Amino acid sequence: MPFNLGPIELGLILLIVAMLFGVGKLPEVFGSIGKGVREFRKESGIDESKQSASATTVAPAPAAPAPAAQATAVNPTTTPEAGQ
């Protein structure tokens, strides 16, 4: 996550924004923020279609190797001892 914000911090930010603008204006506020971010990306040369195209051309990671068989432990109380 950007800026290492957890769910509690994001909730507090959302609560503060709701108190400042009112619950009825939230869709309008976040819509204008989204438009601003899209406009910034468009003007700075960061295009969403380029990002999604480059993400699909990345080769998938190789599959993890099969787990090795685990050896079973022998219970020393049930095995016969060598001298008896």
Image (tube, grey):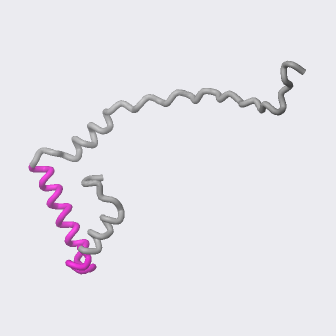
Can you tell which quarter of the image residue 24 is in?
bottom left
Tell me the chief SS of the magenta region.
helix
What range of the chain is rendered magenta? 17-43
Q: Name the residue nearer the viewer: 54 or 1.
A: 1
Name the spot of residue 8 as percent of width and height, x first: 35, 65
Name the spot of residue 62 as percent of width and height, x first: 44, 28
Q: Name the residue nearer the viewer: 19 or 32.
A: 19
62 is higher (above) or lower (below) than 46: above
Name the spot of residue 32 as percent of width and height, x first: 17, 66
The residue that appears at 23% across and 73% down in the rendered structure is 17
1 is higher (above) or lower (below) than 27: above
Determine if the magenta segment contains residue 18. yes
The residue that appears at 27% across and 39% down in the rendered structure is 53
Point out the residue furthest to the right here: 84
Q: Name the residue nearer the viewer: 53 or 44.
A: 44
Can you tell which quarter of the image residue 57 is in?
top left
Is 51 on the left-hand or right-hand side of 79? left
Can you tell which quarter of the image residue 80 is in?
top right
The residue that appears at 15% across and 50% down in the rendered structure is 41
